Structures are given as structure tokens and as C-alpha cells.
Amino acid sequence: MPLVLQALVIGILQGLTEFLPVSSSAHLIVVPEFLGWKDPFLNSAAFDVMLHAGTLAALLIYFWRDLLRLLAAWIGSIRERRVGADPDRRLAWLLLVTMIPGALLGVALESFFDTFFREHIILVAVFLVLGAAILWLAEQLAFLQRGLDNVNFRDAIVLGVAQAFALFPGFSRSGMTIAAGLYTGLTREAAARFSFLMGTPIIAGAAAWKARELLQSGLPSADVPALGVGMLGAAVAGLLAIAFLLDYLRRRTTAPFIAERLVLAALVVVFVLAR
């Protein structure tokens, strides 16, 4: 398959799995392995940055009103040096708090996460199963009574730590943060919405951090079409995934995503044994 089409498939896969609670990093590791796609471009810093840019674009397009409101509230709290009773100011600061655990862990262990799990793919299956178990348990314990206006500092810490687990391929950023939201009593829709909002700065930070490699090596002109196609695929698929999941969780549980994780884990085990 031509590289441009491979980039499109991976971009669509990234956009869907970044926001559905099934682990984008796991899918981006195992699917190319299943299909025998070995081109170094698919694991390059340039392609990684463009995939992050695509998913970030999806978040900015879908939540632009919320993000502008929260940004204005955050700036107002700094200017006036107080948060007060404004729920938007409080939410803006809580979203920043959620970034800390994942940012610290990502900076400290970036090279480890980029290489180790691609060489030990069986661990991805383990994390897929563990993530499925955590999400299932969260569904059993959920009491679904709180909305975004009720999120507090303790919730932000819990969700921030949960977001850090996304660095392990198979756990899933959205999966772990939605599970953590359910543990704290948020409704499924509120947990997903908070997960997406807190993902905006962390995804932007990840893209910026990865982009530093491009400043050193430059952007290969021959790969520009594949980069653009991958980014576009990630953005469109991500936008559709966000809209779908928020609507879906208003009425249903995360059971299908738990099942998908278990099926993928089983396929990974079969693939490793067969190889």
C-alpha cells in the first residue's frame, strides 16, 4: 500500500482511538504490526507531531466556545488575583492541575515510552486488559450524580494521575480519565467532556514537545503529502469520535469499548504466539 494511504489509515485510527476509550497508542503500535507496515516514517517525529496536531484541531473545533470562555476566565482570575465563585475560573485552574502528573512523567520517560513497548508488544495486551478491568469496575461503582460544576481539586488530582497512565500503551487517556470521572461520581457525559477538555492542553503540550525534534532535523519535503493526509484524517476522525462519544454516553455504558479492548488484547496474544 502506498505510504500516503498508510498515513491516511493511521491518521483515521489516531483520531478515532484518541477519543474513544480504547487506547490510541496501543492501536498505533499493533495495527502496523498486524499489517506489516515497517516504513520508518510511520514512527517518525514528524508524523507523530502531525497526528497530535490533527487531534488537537478536532478538540479546538468542537470545544472552541468552551475553551475561549475558560481562557477568558483564567486570564481574568490572574488579572484580579482571585478565583471567587466563578465556576469557569475554578474549572480553568482545575484543568491546569490535571496536566501536572502526565507532563512530569512524559518529560522524564519520553524515550522509554517511545521505544520499549514497540519491542515488547505483549505488554500492550496486558495493559489493554488491565484498562478494560478498570473501566468495567468504574461502571460498577459509578453513581452518576455530579456534573462539571461539581468537580473539585481532589477530582482534578485523581483525573490527572489517571491521565498519566495513558503513557502506557493500552490504558488509554480517555479510558482512564473517564473511568476516574466515574469513580468520583461524575455522569458519563460529564466525565467524557472533562476528559476532552483536560486533553486539550496535554495534547498541545505533547505536540510542542515532539516538535522540538523537527527543529533539529527539519521537515522532509518528500513526506509532506503523507503528513498532510495523516493530519487531516486524524482531525476529521477525531471530530466525529468526540461528537459520537458524548452523544453515546448520555444513554449507554462503556461496555462495547471494554469488549473491543479485550478482543484486541486477544489478537495481540495470538499474533505474538504465531510469530
Image (spheres, rainbow, N blue to C red):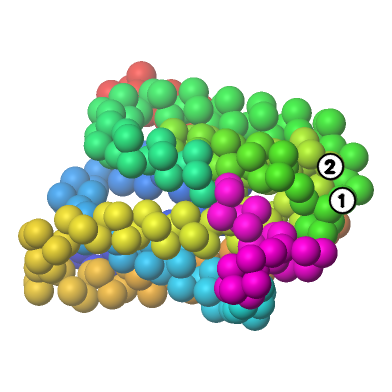
- Verify CB contact (< 8 Å) between mark 1 and mark 2: yes
Is residue 12 at least partly visible in the picture? no
| Residue ID at (28%, 31%) | 112
Q: Give the residue pinned by disc 1.
A: 146
Q: Is residue 112 toward the left or the right of residue 267 in the image?
A: left
- The quarter holding residue 92 reads bottom right
Tell me the residue at 9%/59% (across/down). Answer: 216
Q: Earlier in the sequence, mark 1 or mark 2?
A: 1
Magenta region's main secondary structure? helix
Name the residue carrying label 2: 185
User: Could you tell me residue 165's position as x and y percent?
Assistant: 51, 35
* Part of the protein shown in magenta: 74-98
Q: Amino acid at mark 1?
A: Arg
In-front residue for pair 195/71: 71
How many numbered circles does the render carry? 2
Q: Report the amino acid beneath label 2.
A: Gly
What distance separates the C-alpha of mark 1 from that of mark 2? 6 Å
